Amino acid sequence: SSHRLEESGPRRSLSHAHLARTSRAARVRAAIGAMARGGGRKKKADARQLPIGKRILGGCSAFWRLIFQPSIHTFFFWSFCIYLVSGLLVLVTRPAAEDFFCKVRPQAARGGRGCENCSSKLLLCDKPACWMHANNVTFIANATDPAGSVYQDFQDAATDVTCNGLITSDVNNPLEMVVAVKREEVLQSTTVTTACRKYHCGVLRNALIRLPDLNSWTNECTNFYGSKPGAEASVCPCAGMLKARADGGYWNPGELETVPQSSIWGTSSVWSVSTGAIFDVCGGAPFLQEMQAACANWTAPAPAWCPVAGVTATTGSATTTDSTTAASTSAAARRLEDQAEPMPTEALPSGEVRQQRPAGTDDSGGILDAEASRRLQTTAAGLQNSDLQDYEAGPWGRCTCYQQCTRGVRTRLVECLAEQCKSPKPADRESCICAHCAGCDVDLRLLVFMCIYFLQAAVAFYVFILYVRVLHQTEDDFVKLRLSMKCKGFFYKQLPPLLRVLVLLQLVQLLWLLFDTWLGSALQAGIGDLSKDCIASKDLCLCTVATACLWLFQVVMGRCTKQHSRKPDWLYAPERDSRVPVLKHLRRCFRCLGP
C-alpha cells in the first residue's frame, strides 16, 4: 500500500498543478474579456461625450468603410444593388415590350407572320380594315377602363360563343354584324345576348357617326387612337358604309328623313334592312335619330341615309377601303330582306301576345343541348350520383378573341353517352387572353429573368447582413457554438455558392435574349420568323444591353474581391482535388465568379 501511495503522490500533485494552470488561464481570459467589455463601454461613453459634429463625421467614416472599402461584405452589398437594379429594369421593360408586340400587325400583307400562324384564333384578323379599326378604336376608347360605356359588354361578348360564331360567318363590317344578329334571331330562332348586341352596336355607332378616326364629316379622317398605320392616317376606313344600295352600299336614299318609331323588319319598303336591324338590335329610335342629326354637320357628300333635300347622297367617289366588301354585303342584305319573316306568336291567358318559343329552346330562347333534353325527358331511377357515368372532357382548343392581346374564350368537347351522367358537368368553355402574334416570344423568359434577379438580390442582401454581424467577432466567440450560430454557419457556407449558380443561370438567359434581340433578324432565313420582331422593340434592346453590362460588371467585381480580400478563417474550405480535369477546370471557373 505504501508503494501505491508513493506512485499516486506525484500524479495527484500533477493533477493539482494542471487544474491550477487551467483555472488561472480561465481567470486571465475572464479578466481580458471584462477589460474588453469595459474598454468597449468606455469607448462608447467617450464617443457619447464627443461633440455632435465629430460624432457625425465618425458615423460617416464608419459607413464609408462599411459600404465602400473593398471587402467581402461590400461585394455582397453592391451585388445586391446590381441585382435589384437589373430586376427593376426587366420589370419595367416587360410590359412595355408586350404593349409594343401587341401593336405589331399579324397580317402577312402588312409584314406580319400571317393570321394562320398565330397561336390564338383572331376573329377579325382577316376581316376588312373598317371592322378591325372600328373594333380597335372602340376597345381603346370605350372598353379598356371599367368606367367605359361598353367595358362589361365587351368582357361578356368576347366569351360568347354564339356571338363569335356570327363574326366568323359571311360578315365584313360592323353594320353587317348588326344585320347578322337580327338575321340569327329571325331565321335561326336564336337569342343573341344583350352584351353582344350592345357592344357591336357601340362599334357601329363609332364607325358611322361618332369617331373621326373611322368616318369624318369632312371626308378626311384623323388617327387620334393610333389604330391605322402612318400611310393611312387620313383615310376613312368605314366610308363604304355610308353609300346607297344603288352604289353598292346599304341605304335607301334619304330614308331617315323620317325616323321609324316601331319595328319595321320585313314590313316596309321605305326603310332598308340596315335601318330595320339597327332599330331592333340597337335600342330603337335614339340611334337612328343620332344618325339623322349628324346629317346637318356633313360638309362633304353626306351619307346616303340623309334627307335628299339640301344634301347629296354619298356616291362611289367617297374615299373607301372596302368597296368590294360593301358590294358583296349589299347582296347579302338583299337576300336577308327577301327571306325575313315575322316570328310566330301565341296568345296568353292575360290577353297579351308573345312570340312562340321554338322547340328545343329554353324559356330565355337559348338552344338546349342534347344532354339537357335527355335530362328533361328522364327521371332518376334511384341511382346515386357516384354510381353514374363520368363525363369525358376533351382537350382545350385555341383561345378565340376579336384581336390579339384581348379577352376571349376557349372551348372543349364535354360529352357523356349515358342517359344520366355524374354531376356536376365539367365546364366546356372558359375565358382566356389571346397572345400577340409578333415574331418575338420572350415574355415568359423575361418573367423568369426578373424572378431570378430578385431572388439574387434577396440572397445577396441577407449574406451582406450576416457578414456585417460578424465583423467584430474573434475565434473565442466560436469556442462554444449555439444552435443559432450553427444555422447561420450553414447560410454562410451555402448561400455564396448559390449566388454563383444563379449567376451562371442568368448568363444562359442573357445570351439567349441577346441572340433573339440582336441576331434573330439577321438569321431570319435560317430560324424563320420566331425572332424577327425582337429587334424592333427599343425597350427590349436597351434592357438586354443594360443587363449584360451589369452582369459583366458584377462578375469583374467578384473576381477583384476574390483576389484582394479574404474570408474569415473559420469559413475557409480547401479546394478538393478532382481526378477529372474537366471538372477541375469547371470548379475553378465557378470559384472565380466571386468569394
Image (cartoon, rainbow, N blue to C red):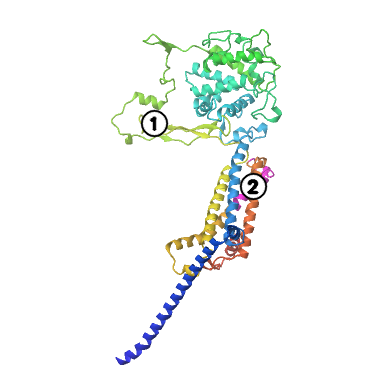
Q: Which residue is mark 2?
A: 544
Q: Is residue 191 left or right of residue 403?
A: left
The image quarter containing residue 256 is top right
Q: Please state which of residues 303 and 181 is positioned toward the viewer in this rendering.
A: 303
Residue farthest to the left?
382
Q: Please state which of residues 60 and 260 is positioned toward the viewer in this rendering.
A: 60
Q: Is residue 555 left or right of residue 350?
A: right
Q: Residue at x 58, y 44 (%)?
A: 91
Q: Please state which of residues 378 and 559 is positioned toward the viewer in this rendering.
A: 559
Q: Which residue is mark 1?
A: 417
- Relative image position of residue 67 (x, y in whole percent): 59, 58
For marks 1 and 2 on the same chain, the one whose residue lies earlier in the sequence:
1
Callout 2: SS: helix
- Relative image position of residue 352 (x, y in whole percent): 40, 10
Residue 278 is covered by the magenta coloring: no
Residue farthest to the bottom?
2
Quarter holding the C terminus? Answer: bottom right
For the residue marked with disc 1, what is the amino acid? Leu
Predominant secondary structure, magenta span: helix
Is 319 drawn above or below residue 405 in the view shown?
Answer: above
Answer whether labels 1 and 2 touch (C-beta < 8 Å): no
Foreground: disc 1 or disc 2: 2
Which portion, as a residue range, is magenta? Answer: 506-529
Q: Residue at x 64, y 46 (%)?
A: 543
Is 53 drawn above or below residue 323 in the view shown?
Answer: below
Quarter holding the N terminus? Answer: bottom left
Residue 518 is covered by the magenta coloring: yes
For the residue marked with disc 2, what is the amino acid? Thr
Q: Callout 1: 10 Å neighbours few (<14), some, many (20+)?
A: few
- Relative image position of residue 370 (x, y in whole percent): 41, 26
